[in-house]
């Protein structure tokens, strides 16, 4: 019994001591995969942090898709639906805040 307890404690110690992998958010991953020269790890991480405080989870999911398909952003911008207008306003505010914070 003492052996099992010691092994469990040792395993727990190694688990806690090992560094955890960074968990990139949707926007950060999309930013890093966008193949843009300014899309450094630190820049994309900063943009994700701003997104976390500026956009809802659902909005972040939508905006992350725009990195692959920018045309969808224009569809939302030109839409007459009130929900799209609200998303576009929040997105613009997020973009302005990210530009100020992450540049």
Image (tube, rainbow, N blue to C red):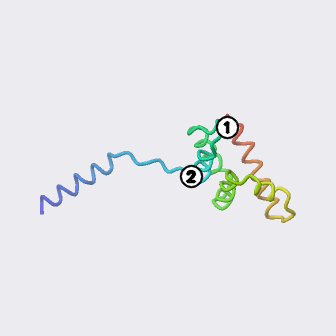
Which of discs 2 and 1 lies nearer the camera? The answer is 2
Residue located farthest toward the left when viewing the structure as drawn: 2
Query: How far is mark 2 from mark 1, CA to CA?
Result: 18 Å
Image quarter hosting the N terminus: bottom left
Picture mark count: 2
Check whether the beta carbons of the residues at disc 2 and disc 1 lie within 8 A of each other: no
**Secondary structure type for disc 1:** helix
At which x and y percent is residue 50?
64, 46
The one nearer the camera, 35 or 22, is: 35
Res. 10 mark: none
Q: Quadrant of residue 77?
A: bottom right
Residue located 56% across and 39% down the image: 41
* Callout 2: SS: loop
In terms of depth relative to the viewer, which is nearer, 4 or 45? Answer: 45
Camera-nearest residue between 3 and 37: 37
Circle 2 packing at 10 Å, graded few (<14), some (14-19), many (20+), is some
For marks 2 and 1, the one nearer the N-term is 2
Q: Is residue 82 left or right of residue 95?
A: right
Residue 12 point in image, percent of width and height: 27, 54
Instruction: Give the residue at x 43% y 48%.
Output: 21
Q: Which residue is mark 1?
A: 101
Q: Residues within 10 Å of mark 1 (few under 14, many from 20)?
A: few
Q: Horizontal placement of 37 versus 4: left or right?
A: right
State the image coordinates of residue 95 (x, y, percent, origin top left): 73, 45
Which one is nearer the viewer's eye here, 53 or 19?
19
The residue shown at (28%, 49%) is: 14
Against 81, is 13 above or below? above
Q: Which residue is mark 2?
A: 25
Residue 37 image offset from top left, x and y in percent: 64, 36
| Residue at the (63%, 43%) spot, across then down | 35
What quarter of the picture does the C terminus occupy?
Answer: top right
């Amino acid at each position: 019994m003492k052996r099992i307890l010691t092994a469990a404690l040792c395993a727990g110690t190694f688990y806690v001591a090992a560094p955890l992998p960074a968990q990139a958010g949707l926007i950060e991953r999309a930013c890093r995969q966008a193949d843009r020269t300014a899309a450094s790890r630190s820049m994309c991480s900063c943009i994700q942090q701003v997104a976390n405080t500026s956009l809802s989870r659902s909005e972040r999911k939508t905006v992350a898709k725009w990195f692959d398909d920018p045309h969808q952003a224009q569809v939302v911008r030109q839409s007459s639906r009130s929900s799209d207008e609200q998303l576009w306003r929040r997105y613009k505010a997020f973009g302005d805040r990210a530009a100020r914070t992450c540049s």
